[in-house]
Image: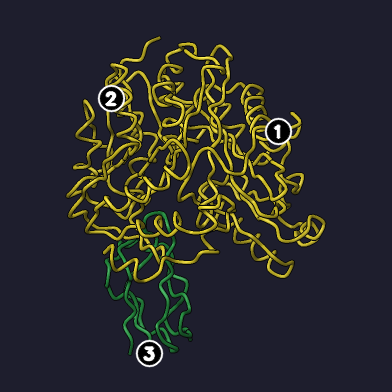
Amino acid sequence: MPLRRVLVANRGEIARRVIRACHDEGIEAIAVHSDVDAAAPFVAEADTALLIGPGPAADSYLSVEALLQAARDSGADSLHPGYGFLSENAAFARAVEEEGLAWIGPPSDVIEAMGSKLSARTMMAELGVPVVPGTDGPLADDGDSVAEGEALGFPLMVKASAGGGGIGMQRVDDPETLRTAVATARQRAQAAFGDGTVFLERFLDGPRHVEVQVLADSDGSVIHLGERECSVQRRHQKLLEETPSCALDAILRRRMTAAAVLAARSIGYISAGTVEFIVDARRNFYFLEMNTRLQVEHPITELCTGVDLVRQQLRIAAGQPLDMEQRDVISRGHAIEMRIYAEDPVRMLPSPGTITEYQEPEGEGVRVDAGVAAGSAVPHFYDPLLAKLVVHGSDRPTAIGRALAALDGFRIEGVKTNLTLHRHVLASEPFTSGEYTTALLAEIGPPPRAQQATSA
Amino acid sequence: MTEVKAELVGNLWKIVTVVGQQVEEDDTLMILESMKMEIPVTSPVNGTVKEILVKEGDVVQEGQTVAIVE
């Protein structure tokens, strides 16, 4: 069934991205927004926009009832959840399906199966995909977490089964602090996800986060579009991503992409999805989790493969078969994405406010996916992502050079931004050598003062 | 008497001290939530919490006095 009218249940840059893809496909896009977002670019670019509530996300972008009502009022036949908010909420996906709308993503039962990190681990282990060594099941409420931790070995990670965005995740280096860390993680997971289930995983040596993009249609065809290196992180949240990854050779790439395709096929995956792995210092790889939605960092894959992932999602949701086979997917050159946050680059504290001046960089191989423009409010209710600066070049050094030039050409005033932090990362020895791990930001420290002054 | 000010605008998520409590410099008095991040509001001095001027759920402005420590 062809889609006519898509409700875009998100805000900021990803709402604009989805609206653009809808228009490319000749589909109407309906925006929904909170009152503080009324003047945002995504609202102006949609064919119709509906106010769904006040600033706090719980009363607007996270309100299932408000979103379903907006879908009814606008006559939408489908819904794109973007990322974050309700995008991986199986109950919401089910409610959308039951409303008779096409959910632009995988079926709700697949979201549910992958939404529990513990059940996802078990399923992958049964398929023969390596998983990070960890506790077999949830830590019991009254159980002896220290004994379990010692059996596994320190350092280790405490993780929330329902987790996301680094919430409820903590590294623990010794048995003395484990009990407190488990209690904190349980409390945070309960507050954030309504599920306080936690488990332990061994902390691997020299870990890198590498993920594989997959696309699957409702006829059961599954292909991959290569990997993305996502090891530049702070507080377990990604800051900068690149593809291809310097950690993978052709053999490891073949094994990891094959594991991702196997995983997606085995669980009946449909739409665009991402299988996340950890690669350790000895180049062993382990399944981490599957993200059952579009990723923030999807543009780097688009720049190297020429495949528009959001348009593919729309076509798949309309029941169309994939219009390409694995052998048609060719990745060319190198791409880097920098997440531009409204954030103090040194203290990494958020910086809400109003953007007074805004000028995007231009140039060969430069793409900017932004949620803001001059005059835009940056409300404290939502995450601090202002824009994604994405560059492509024929090889890695070219891409890095273009990234640095583009950062210099990006002008954002009124809120603090992390542009200098990106310069600092791109110029650092671990990054230029390609030999870096998730500890990169901790190792290189904050950007030097002089650099901040010149960019102010 | 020292006024404790919020560093940035946000939603007051949690108050973790009570009036009359002894606190040391850098102890967390309350936690703000801004842009999906938890930001502790800490005591600038050693002393006693004299007054808490906000309640959980309030929107706090940058520079707003949220507590007084003596």
Q: Quadrant of the N terminus of chain A?
A: top left
From this viewpoint, is residue A176 visible?
yes
Mark 3 vs mark 2, CA separation in Å:
56 Å
Residue drawn at x 35%, y 44% as measured from the top left: A389
The answer to whether residue A57 is left or right of residue A49 is right
Residue drawn at x 30%, y 42% as measured from the top left: A370
Residue type marked 1: Met
Residue drawn at x 54%, y 43% as measured from the top left: A229
Q: Which residue is mark 1?
A: A124
| Observer-nearest of A149 and B68 | A149
Instruction: Name the chain under label 2.
Output: A
Q: Check whether the beta carbons of the residues at disc 3 and disc 2 lie within 8 A of each other.
A: no
Q: Quadrant of the C terminus of chain A?
A: bottom left
Residue drawn at x 41%, y 87% as measured from the top left: B45
- In the image, the chain rendered in yellow is A
Instruction: Name the chain under label 3.
Output: B
Q: Tell me the mark number nearer the camera, choosing from 1 and 3.
A: 1
| Observer-nearest of A335 and A199 | A335
* Apparent colour of chain B: green
The answer to whether residue A418 is left or right of residue A244 is left
Q: Which residue is mark 2?
A: A29
Mark 2 vs mark 1, CA separation in Å:
37 Å
The numbered mark at residue B70 is 3
Residue type marked 3: Glu
Instruction: Name the chain under label 1.
Output: A
